[in-house]
Image (tube, coloured by chain):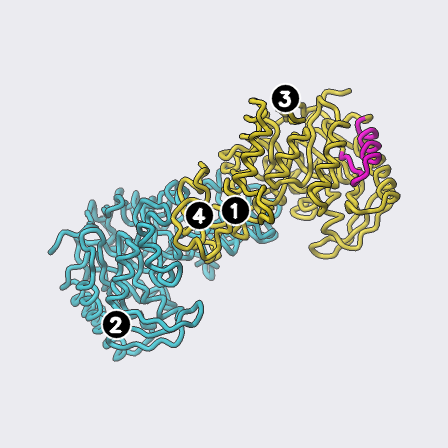
Chain colours: A cyan, B yellow
């Protein structure tokens, strides 16, 4: 096994759940886990400045390989000195493989052993992404953590297809590992697939853990399946992964799923949810979802969340934020984006504290009660 | 004469021009003049946070009475504790009278002695604004500096109409002064009109200076007339205004007109130009206009302005900003808005220094040369 530039240090396992407290060290600093990673698709976390992300406690963010490959192009980012320098962010950056976007955004895709032919969602131009190309692009982008190119089939895909896909993803992972040009400065993760099938997840994990990856991602979840299904898959998947490496559950960012994921041994999460709903005037608070653009808040001079200590909640009222969003003022989206990201980063901080104190189950119960997850038909995420 | 809550202190007159260096004190702090005021139409300077405005040296901003009256409504702002509290800005705020917007934005207006009937530009609803109403709204909004309700006819309006309009604006000014409920905490300015006619400007200034206003605005300029016309009018208008009160030239924000205005004795300026062009990917630099969204900057890793020390120029490249703007990312507009506002605030700082050193003419010459104003057919603002 080589010395990876991204390492995991286990600090403590929670007594009553599978949760683990730890630290991940990257060439751009160390962050505590479990951790939520804000998404900065195009080398910017929408509406936010890097200083604001640092202020709210983000130690790592995610950017999207597919999007950056199309705009501005990997060569420009490389010439700028890599993503960190390009976007003025000196903490951790993780990029995905582009695989998920090819399967969710691109048009007319055709999957072959060599890679995937498809058309750009921007201008329809013909593109080709292979395990080698995905690694090559990420080598140019220069994130601390890279992902292997994978196929992400729908959760309800057939067993036979999913099996073939898992086997191909394993072959792609091996090819990607060989293509990796910067193993000393960028950590490469393998992505475990297998849909809802326990034996396929087992096979995928076995294939990938036999290779020397810096960490392991769990893909193919949070793609529309019921949350119970996701938890069921996590129950048998995380135990398949090595204890001494980071585990990353891709695309998860609802408060309940973050906690449930942590309880099943996940260390890292990412999701566009907090920033996406923020731009629609919807916020997460300790009392559940609050749609601040609603007329009910026109004269409400309380902060978004009376229990929140973020920049937005310390300085601005629901009435002001509603006014800004109704008037299509950018600053309103900054304020809701800041709050939602802070809310999830702060939630993870509380989760880490609960692990430290071995009371994650009590914390979850109390959080769910306050947030409204226990109410029947609660309108939540 | 009463003790106004807004006062002007003359510090120095420049030796070779009409420029004056001074300080204006408001209930929310003192700022140096000449000063440029960023425009925050809807209680937000588009894309910017109050902390950023403070950081770049803004001591006062402008908000628009007409817009705030429509959204969110003066009562909500009043209930929030006034504009300062509503938008979390504890330095100076100036509001206009709504008059200019009624004449530039609203539909189907009908001017009577009592006031103006018109329809909202948002939903077509019938509205009525009078001198008393404009003051009443501003009393509720709570800015440090308020404007009298005025009529702002086109610059090329006939002499006869302009004369009638000036006389009405004087009567409106007197009514507004009487309607003012907070003379101890909000300073009210009169607005000198009169188009391009020297005797009408004289009449307007005489009428208004016979009333006890805290300061005087020069209206009806920068409304499409050639700059030379504006300078011609300023040449005979500012000498009509009292030396011991602030003089505010409304709606001016091109670098050349700011300097020319200062040279003619103006203390305060405002304009949407820096933030409006910023949102279109256009910036002001010491070398002139730079349209950063152009393809020429795709691989340009220099700052917007190599002579600028603002947050944007210290941390980001043209290539990154171009990428953000081409990708319609809000953060790009934050960066260009920050830079353009900083550029004008910094220009005024340099202008104040030049007044201090009695070399404003040399400063102007050198600035115009660098900026490109001396080039024939220069594409500038």
- Disc marking residue B283: 1
Question: Neighbour class for label 4 at 10 Å: few (<14), some, many (≥20)?
Answer: many
Label 3 vs label 4: CA separation? 47 Å
Q: Residues within 10 Å of mark 2 (few under 14, many from 20)?
A: some
- Of the residues tagged 4 and 1, which is closer to the observer? 1
Can you identify the residue that label 2 sits on?
A197
Say which quarter of the image contains residue A272. Answer: bottom left
| Same subunit, tags 3 and 2 | no
Q: CA distance from mark 3 to mark 2?
A: 85 Å
**Precedes in sequence: disc 1 or disc 3:** 3
- Horizontally, residue A66 falls left or right of residue B53, namely left
Q: Quadrant of residue B20?
A: top right
Membership of B220 in magenta stretch: no
Asked which secondary structure carries label 2, the reply is: loop
On the question of residue A155 being in view, the answer is no
The verdict on a common chain for dots 4 and 1 is no
Residue occupying the point 30% across, 69% down: A129
Q: CA distance from mark 2 to mark 1?
A: 55 Å
Q: What residue would you read off at disc 4? A: A48
């Amino acid at each position: 096994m080589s010395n990876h530039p991204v390492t995991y240090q286990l600090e403590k396992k929670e007594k009553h759940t599978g949760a683990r407290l730890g630290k991940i060290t990257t060439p751009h600093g160390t962050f505590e886990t479990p951790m939520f990673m804000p998404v900065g698709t195009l080398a910017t976390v929408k509406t936010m400045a890097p200083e604001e992300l640092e202020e709210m406690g983000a130690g790592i963010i995610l950017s999207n390989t597919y999007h950056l490959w199309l705009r501005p192009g990997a060569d420009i980012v490389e010439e700028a000195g890599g993503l960190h320098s390009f976007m003025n962010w000196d903490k951790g950056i993780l990029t995905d493989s582009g695989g998920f976007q090819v399967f969710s955004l691109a048009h007319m895709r055709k999957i072959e052993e060599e890679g995937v032919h498809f058309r750009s969602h921007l201008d329809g131009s013909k593109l080709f992404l292979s395990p080698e190309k995905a690694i090559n692009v990420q080598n140019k982008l220069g994130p601390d953590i890279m992902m292997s190119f994978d196929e992400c089939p729908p959760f309800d895909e057939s067993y036979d297809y999913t099996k073939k896909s898992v086997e191909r993803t394993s072959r792609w992972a091996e090819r990607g590992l060989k293509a990796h040009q910067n193993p000393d400065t960028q950590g490469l993760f393998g992505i475990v697939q297998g849909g809802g099938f326990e034996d396929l997840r087992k096979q995928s994990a076995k294939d990938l853990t036999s290779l020397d990856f810096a960490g392991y991602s769990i893909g193919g979840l949070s793609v529309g399946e019921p949350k119970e299904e996701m938890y069921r898959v996590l129950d048998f998947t995380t135990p398949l992964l090595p204890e001494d490496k980071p585990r990353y559950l891709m695309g998860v960012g609802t408060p309940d799923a973050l906690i449930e994921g942590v309880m099943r041994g996940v260390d890292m999460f990412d999701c566009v949810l907090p920033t996406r709903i923020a731009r629609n005037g919807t916020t997460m608070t300790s009392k559940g979802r609050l749609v601040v653009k609603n007329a009910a808040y026109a004269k409400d001079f309380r902060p978004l969340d009376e229990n929140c200590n973020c920049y937005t909640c310390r300085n601005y009222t629901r009435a002001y934020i509603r006014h800004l969003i109704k008037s299509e003022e950018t600053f309103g989206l900054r304020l809701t984006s800041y709050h939602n990201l802070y809310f999830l980063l702060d939630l993870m901080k509380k989760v880490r504290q609960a692990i430290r104190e071995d009371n994650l189950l009590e914390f979850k119960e109390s959080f769910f009660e306050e947030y409204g997850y226990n109410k029947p038909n609660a309108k939540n995420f």
